[in-house]
Image (cartoon, grey):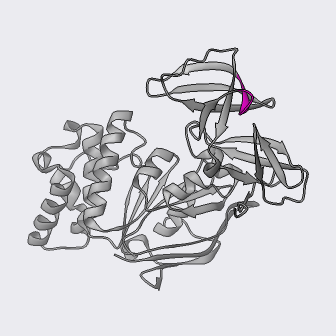
Amino acid sequence: MANIVIDRIKKTFGAYDALKEISLTIGDGEFVSLLGPSGCGKTTLLRIIAGLETETSGQILIGGKPVNGLAPKDRGLAMVFQNYAVFPHMTVFENVAFGLRMQKADDQRVKKQVEKAAALLHIEPYLDRYPNKLSGGQRQRVAVARALAVEPQVLLMDEPLSNLDALLRLEMRTELKSVLQASGTTTIYVTHDQTEALGLSDRIAVMYGGRIEQVGPPVEIYSHPATRFVGSFMGNPPMNFIKLPVENGSVKLGSETHVVPKTGGSDILLGLRGENVSRTTLADGLRLDVRVSEPMGSHLLLTGTIEGQPVRFILPPGENVKAGESIGLKPDADRLTWLVPETGQALQPVAA
């Protein structure tokens, strides 16, 4: 295992800046997800770490040693791809053993490491089978086992669950977390799926436009977004943003007055998660004009407007709210995020 230092990595394709001086340190044994929409640069960064792409400038260190210019096989890492990349003409045993064979490991070590990796991934019954006799989830387990069998310093994973159906993704996500906790392998995981990132990661690096917008533990990223983009990208439904006037350094939320950070302007942006409200009277709360009411089983999802601005909120399943109604919502005072309207940057709350 090893730590990873990504130091001011930049990547340009002609006039296009795919990565804009990315810096990130990943601890020994840590699981970090690179999360963001398509085109944000997360896969490009992963490929540079792997040695499959050459950086324009900057440095990568693995275990304290610079790896710029080293071939992928000399970097002490293994990679799991989106499309499984298992060899159809090889048995599961030989697929898992492939990296070890490339290292010219002796037969005793090959057998030991294959059996160890197969046990971790629960694929022992399939070692004599060929990939065409396996399900998609089983083939992905083989790909992960092959990566772990060589005992890499670093494991790189590029959207490894995206080809699986929803139920298999849930099963594999649970299995993957258990396996990587047991192995203690330093892992970088690329995904656009926030559920995967939240469930698997020690920390998440949210990327957008070739930059890292925020790095932190999953709870921090979700509850305290550093930018409007992070708040809107994380969560289902995403965070609501409501522009409100500031008077004498305060904002009125229903019958309550909140002192807010200074923005230098006459307005402030309130970021509010859909679940961080409770129902109250129209006189006491923010007025939500309901456009659509959707019973979702575990909760009631309301879509509407506050002060003419589109929002979505979640109430308990027992609430009876119909489209066309107006109701009062009381925000949880401890769950408010204040942002600068012009830049979308979060502000530090005012101390009580």
Can residue 261 be found in the magenta stretch? no
Residue 349 position in % (x across, y down) = 71, 60
Residue 201 position in % (x across, y down) = 43, 58
Is residue 246 rendered to the left or right of residue 121? right
Note whether 256 is above or below 225 in the view shown: above
Residue 51, can we see it? no
Can residue 285 be found in the magenta stretch? yes
Quadrant location of the N terminus in the rendered image: bottom left
Residue 291, quarter of the rendered image: top right
| Residue lying at 66% horizontally and 32% vertically, measured from the top left | 329
Residue 290, can we see it? yes
Residue 244, quarter of the rendered image: top right
Q: Nearer the viewer, residue 93 or 315?
A: 315
Quadrant location of the C terminus in the rendered image: bottom right
Note whether 332 is above or below 158 in the view shown: above
Q: Nearer the viewer, residue 335 or 147?
A: 335
Note whether 129 is above or below 48 in the view shown: above
Is residue 198 rendered to the left or right of residue 56? left
Residue 83, quarter of the rendered image: top left
Per the rendered image, the range of residues in magenta is: 282-289
| Residue lying at 73% horizontally and 62% vertically, measured from the top left | 350
Q: Nearer the viewer, residue 315 or 52?
A: 315
Residue 240 position in % (x across, y down) = 68, 40
Residue 178 position in % (x across, y down) = 27, 55
